[in-house]
Amino acid sequence: MTTAPLTPAPAAPDGGWTPRLGFSLLSMVLILELLSASYLMISMALPTISQHYETDQTAWMMTGFLLVGAVSAPLLGKAADMVGKRKVLLACVAVATVGFLISAVAPTYGIMILGRALGGFLIPPLFLTYSLIRDVFPRRTIALAVSISTAGMGLVAIPTPFLAGWLIDDFGWRSMFWFCTIILAVMGVLVRISTPETPVRTRSHIDIVGAVLIGGGLAGILLGVSFGPTWGWSAPGTLVALIGGVVLLAAWLVSASKIPEPLISLSLLRRRSVLLIVVSAGCIYGVSTLFSTILPYVVMMSDKLGLGYGFGVDHEGFAVFQVPTGGMTMVGGLIVGFLVGRGSRPRLTMAAGMLAAGVGAALSGINLASEPYLLVCAGLVGLGMGLSYASIPNLLIEAVAPQLQASTASIVAAVQSVLPGILSVIMFTVLNGSFKADLPVEVTQGAAIYTSQGWTVAFLMTAVVALAGLVAAVLLPKKFAQATAQGPDDAAAITIAASGAVPSVDEAGAAARV
């Protein structure tokens, strides 16, 4: 069954800016800003949170959030086409608000992860807001409104660490979640009273079975990999999780090949250019997640433990280390916009970005004891991230016809969310299995503390991920044979407009700078 319009897309309304329209745009922009800000905040607080709950399963703070966001986004995109984008946007904000509230009061780490998973519903508003603006804003205001809603996302990378540092140091790490809860609730009310619902409706098939299979399969495998060292690799729980996850993913592949509108179009993934773009995009977001997770541990560890790393800075002090990463990410995006606008190929800027990020990550692992050195390495990684982020949408424009760009972007975005979650679990599994520091309990307070060799390995793992992305970028065709709709999967995908634009946090800002 293919997607069919129930109502024709109306012409954009006439008129200009009004106070109500300004409030509508402000509320949606702040929701997007909060998604990016909360991700940065929680990365900074990971060492403190793991120490509070005395856990070595820190990866699930990111993995739960990303996994739910990746699986829910395509489903909610189609639902928005069917029942209305504002309704689904408000539902996402409501669920995410509950998730942040649960995290703010979580008495156990399991409940904390539940809250973080529900917070993953904040990812779909990335595309819902842009689609809603396109449908209901006056024609003359759409270009500026979309530019404001996207360009602002790149700016939070610099002030957010200082805000997070102030909140965590002065009010405790729970204050971050309270801050997000309050802002989200207020913005939801503002959207409700200032933004009209879109009249556009389509008839579509929602692949709930596919979402359950792929979500359950990934969760099972990640659970088995994460807890395998603790439970034992031959323990029944580990085997059930691993085997069950593989079976569910196999069932999803069968399902996706038989239904007309699968969660992820396998026919698109069979195209060499699309597959390589997906791989390279997933790798750069994997690099970003791993590097932003490692750096707070290395920098904020006490310098009195004799571990060979750590400067003993507080959260406000760590914000300084985020500045070169965020600033150079913006610079990388601007470079791509300049070069591609003058005829350079985005496959080259993607390869350059992967190379810069990989070199920066590898060099970081060589010397963990020098602050200026790590600041330079962080800037190099940030430059690579910016170059690669901004190359992704340009590659998609080259590789697929306009009708397929939304559906292809949904595949890219799903991998950009899932792969970093998988890599985080793998990294901490390696660290927990081989590189825990032998320190007395009164020093560690039950939290996992790792050796300098462990963090060197983690940085090198990050560099290997960048190398994989570099290989994928180099193998991209010099000239793309642009993909067009040919099979039933593709025909169905053409009209799934809202389900595709699911850029991850940094991509939204980078794409606006192209």
Image (cartoon, rainbow, N blue to C red):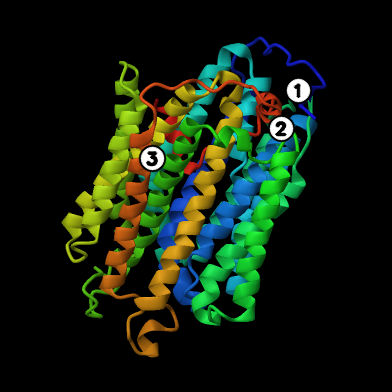
Image coords of residue 187 (percent x, y): 62, 41
Residue 334 visible in the picture: no
Give me the residue at 54% from left, 51% from top: 418
Q: Between 293 and 489, which is closer to the camera in this rendering? A: 489
Earlier sequence position, callout 2 versus callout 1: 2
Image quadrant containing the C terminus: top left
Q: Is residue 214 left or right of residue 293?
A: right
Q: Between 403 and 98, which is closer to the camera in this rendering? A: 403
Give me the residue at 32% from left, 16% from top: 343
Give me the residue at 40% from left, 38% from top: 155
Image coords of residue 24 (percent x, y): 63, 30
| Label 3 – label 1 distance at C-alpha | 38 Å
For the residue labelled by badge 1, is the local secondary structure a helix, a strand or a loop?
loop
Circle 3 is placed at which residue position?
A: 472
Image coords of residue 133 (percent x, y): 62, 25
2 and 1 marks in contact (CB < 8 Å): yes
Residue type highlighted by circle 1: Val
Circle 1 is placed at which residue position?
A: 200
Disc 3 or disc 2, which is closer to the eye?
3
Residue type highlighted by circle 3: Ala
From this view, report whether residue 129 is shown above or below residue 51: above
Q: Between 440 and 488, which is closer to the camera in this rendering? A: 488
